[in-house]
Image (tube, rainbow, N blue to C red):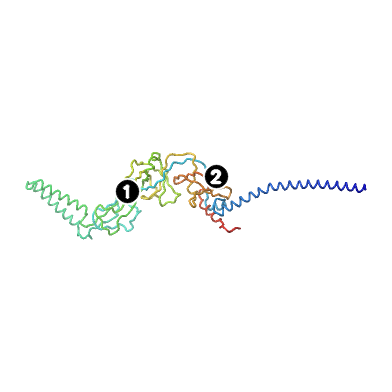
């Protein structure tokens, strides 16, 4: 019985020890499981974010876009760092490029007749020199015969009549009034003959200045009359930029110092600045036109060869400067369904499409009211290529890999 009791005690003692060990192990296991439960939710929390980001890309909303360095080099990608800076108050209006005073002249017909071009290739943009013959007017095909020859004959008759009248007046045969009438007839005949040309009935019309033919207003064989415009010749050395400002902006005109402009045939990212081209502000209109209710503001600038007189322009009048304004180049902005976006570099080879709210533009840069922060790197040149790369990776709904 003692042995049995001893064995029972030992068995009971072993059971207590194993139970205690198992409890510690179980406690340890519980601690380990508790640690795993703290890590697992973090992993599960990260994965949905990645999936949600990927889903955003597939749906074409805001999301990260992969664009490698090789793609960036091929696209000529350029980045800039967002920094607040100086930006002018802007009034956006329309206007037109016009020739400066004295830089343009109209070629007119000097007699009536049928016109022909001096050269078959005379057209808009042709370079001409002062005194060069541009047109030849011929009166011989006209139905009323030879008006130039008739005028020459009348001039000769008036000259003889005046000489006879002067002789008779010296002999006191005719009165002074009759002598004055003879002189008047001679003057009129002389003016008529001069306007019609020689009896050959042809007359050359020459360019009044050196420059370029702006527009040819007649075709070969057209009938013209004295004083009728035939063409315009412009030197195009200086131009005037006329901005038509609505009345509601009249109070801002006193602050206007400069302007940038973009011609109708140029891309939206191309803009010229008057001061950078050597131009200047000429006048601010003080009155409103009775017909169009616009106030004119005029700048004068040299033509460096790429500007076409007569072109319509989008004009950005630049006023007082503002500090601390975030702006981006116009080429950095893309548009989709009425919303505007830029592309921000978040990591190497990774970009994020960021929606922005825009303010005024000066034709080159545009104010960003919200959506960007100082220090962010934004795609300038190459934004279109990044957008195309994003669209190329979109997975249609209903498909997954």
Q: Which residue is mark 1?
A: 104
Image depth: mark 1 or mark 2 in front: 2
How many numbered marks are there? 2
Question: Residue at horizontal 84%, vertical 48%?
Answer: 15
Residue 238 in sight from this viewpoint = no
- Mark closer to the chain start, 1 or 2: 1
Residue furthest to the front in view is 1
234 sits left or right of 68 in the view: left
66 sits left or right of 287 in the view: right
Tell me if mark 1 has few (under 14), some (14-19) or many (20+) residues whose alpha carbon lies within 10 angstroms of its own.
Answer: many
Mark 1, secondary structure of its residue = strand
Residue 233 location (% of width, % of height): 32, 51
The label shown at residue 70 is none
Q: Where is the C terminus found, in terms of image quarters?
A: bottom right
Residue 321 location (% of width, % of height): 45, 39
Residue 291 location (% of width, % of height): 32, 47
Q: Which residue is mark 2?
A: 376
Residue 324 location (% of width, % of height): 49, 39
Residue situated in front as seen by the camera: 354 or 312:
354
Residue 61 in sight from this viewpoint = yes
Q: CB of mark 1 within 8 Å of CB of mark 2? A: no
Mark 2, secondary structure of its residue = loop
Residue situated in front as seen by the camera: 335 or 34:
34
Question: Residue 394: which quarter of the image?
Answer: bottom right
Question: Residue at horizontal 53%, vertical 50%?
Answer: 77
Tell me if mark 2 has few (under 14), some (14-19) or many (20+) residues whose alpha carbon lies within 10 angstroms of its own.
Answer: some
C-alpha separation, residue under disc 1 versus residue under disc 2: 51 Å
Question: Residue at horizontal 42%, vertical 51%?
Answer: 266
Q: Is residue 395 above or below residue 184?
A: below
């Amino acid at each position: 019985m003692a042995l049995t009791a001893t064995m029972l005690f030992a068995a009971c003692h072993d059971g207590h020890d194993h139970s205690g060990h198992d409890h510690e192990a179980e406690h340890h296991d519980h601690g380990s499981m508790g640690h795993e439960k703290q890590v697992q939710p973090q992993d599960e929390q990260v994965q949905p974010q990645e999936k949600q980001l990927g889903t955003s890309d597939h749906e074409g909303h805001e999301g990260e876009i992969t664009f490698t360095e090789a793609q960036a080099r091929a696209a000529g990608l350029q980045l800039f760092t967002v920094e607040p800076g100086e930006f002018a108050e802007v009034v956006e209006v329309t206007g037109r490029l016009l020739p400066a005073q004295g830089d343009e002249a109209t070629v007119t017909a000097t007699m009536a007749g049928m016109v022909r071009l001096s050269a078959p290739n005379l057209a808009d943009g042709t370079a001409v020199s002062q005194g060069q013959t541009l047109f030849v007017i011929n009166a011989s095909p006209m139905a009323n015969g030879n008006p130039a020859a008739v005028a020459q004959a009348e001039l000769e008759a008036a000259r003889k009549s005046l000489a006879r009248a002067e002789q008779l007046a010296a002999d006191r045969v005719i009165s002074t009034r009759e002598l004055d009438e003879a002189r008047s007839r001679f003057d009129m005949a002389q003016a008529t003959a001069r306007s019609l040309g020689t009896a050959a009935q042809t007359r050359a019309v020459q360019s009044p200045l050196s420059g370029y033919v702006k527009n040819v207003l007649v075709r070969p064989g057209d009938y013209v009359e004295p004083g009728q415009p035939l063409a315009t010749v412009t030197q195009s050395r200086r131009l005037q930029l006329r901005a038509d400002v609505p009345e509601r902006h009249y109070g801002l005109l006193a602050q206007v110092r400069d302007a940038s402009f973009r011609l109708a045939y140029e891309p939206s990212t191309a803009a010229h600045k008057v001061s950078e081209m050597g131009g200047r502000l000429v006048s601010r209109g003080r009155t409103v036109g009775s017909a169009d209710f616009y106030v004119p503001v005029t700048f004068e600038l040299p033509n460096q060869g790429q500007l076409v007189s007569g072109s319509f322009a989008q004009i950005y009048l630049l006023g007082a400067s503002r500090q601390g304004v975030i702006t981006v180049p116009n080429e950095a902005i893309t548009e989709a369904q009425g919303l505007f976006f830029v592309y921000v570099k978040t990591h190497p080879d990774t970009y994020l499409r960021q929606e922005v709210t825009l303010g005024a533009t000066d034709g080159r840069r545009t104010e960003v009211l919200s959506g960007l922060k100082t220090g962010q790197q934004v795609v300038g040149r190459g934004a279109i290529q990044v957008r195309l790369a994003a669209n190329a990776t979109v997975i249609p709904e209903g498909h997954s890999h």
